[in-house]
Image (cartoon, rainbow, N blue to C red):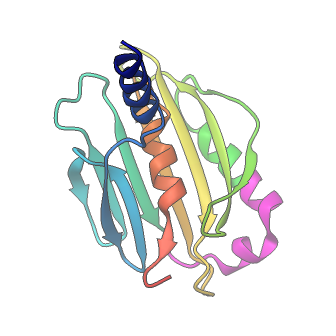
Amino acid sequence: MRAAIILAFALLTGCAGREPAAQRVSFGPLDVALPADWAVSKQTDNKVTWAPPDNARKESLSLTRTAPREALAKAGPAAIERFLVDAQKSLPGASFGLPTHFTTPSGMMGVRIEGDFLPSDGSQRYRRVHAVLVDGVGDGALLHAVYTAAEPDSQPMRILLDSLQRKGA
């Protein structure tokens, strides 16, 4: 009986601490991770959007590398904050919190903002997390990571941001 209890405890604690399955993908000069079952839904030269196959939660996660904006990148986090806040104001029915600063495990610094908006069709509110990071290759390019969902889950954005790193790093 004691062995069965120990085995059950080991299984429960092993599963509780396990990270969700993820896949590694490349995006230009970056390597990132995504939930294992998500796939590309749209892609251009500077933007890729992923979504789960059975998308009942209406989730998407996109990563965009902008053209260099050296002045904005050099202006620092306060300027990026203002840029990020202004970008959310353009969403219909927007209600967003204050931006927060963060650093990824690989050392990339960024600013993120979270909130809700109501698409113009008025069907239902969506949660949006928008993070902007300075790419770090010296040309002033910005990386935009955007997670949107009708029924949000914090894991997809966390997996992406925690995994961002330059290729070969």
Query: Could you tell me which residue is drawn at 36 percent across and 14 percent down?
Result: 123
Image coordinates for residue 13, horizontal then vertical, percent: 46, 30
Give above or below for 149 relative to 105. above
Image coordinates for residue 160, horizontal then vertical, percent: 45, 53
Q: Residue furthest left?
A: 53
Q: Nearer the viewer, residue 19 or 145?
A: 19
Query: Could you tell me which residue is drawn at 32 percent across and 71 percent down?
Result: 26
Q: Nearer the viewer, residue 80 or 8?
A: 8
Q: Does residue 83 appear to the left or right of 34 in the view shown? A: right
* Residue numbers of the magenta segment: 67-82
Image coordinates for residue 72, horizontal then vertical, percent: 71, 71
Q: Does residue 98 appear to the left or right of 51 in the view shown? A: right
Q: Magenta span has 77?
A: yes
Q: Nearer the viewer, residue 22 or 18?
A: 18
Q: Does residue 151 appear to the left or right of 162 in the view shown? A: left
Give above or below for 161 relative to 118. below
Give above or below for 28 relative to 79. below
Q: Magenta span has 112?
A: no
Query: Could you tell me which residue is drawn at 53 percent across and 55 percent down?
Result: 161
- In the picture, the quarter occupied by the N terminus is top left
Residue 114: name its quadrant.
Answer: top right
Q: Exactly how many numbered labels are in the figure?
A: 0
Residue 133: name its quadrant.
Answer: bottom right
Image coordinates for residue 83, horizontal then vertical, percent: 69, 54
Query: Could you tell me which residue is drawn at 53 percent across and 65 percent down?
Result: 143
Q: Main secondary structure of the magenta part?
A: helix
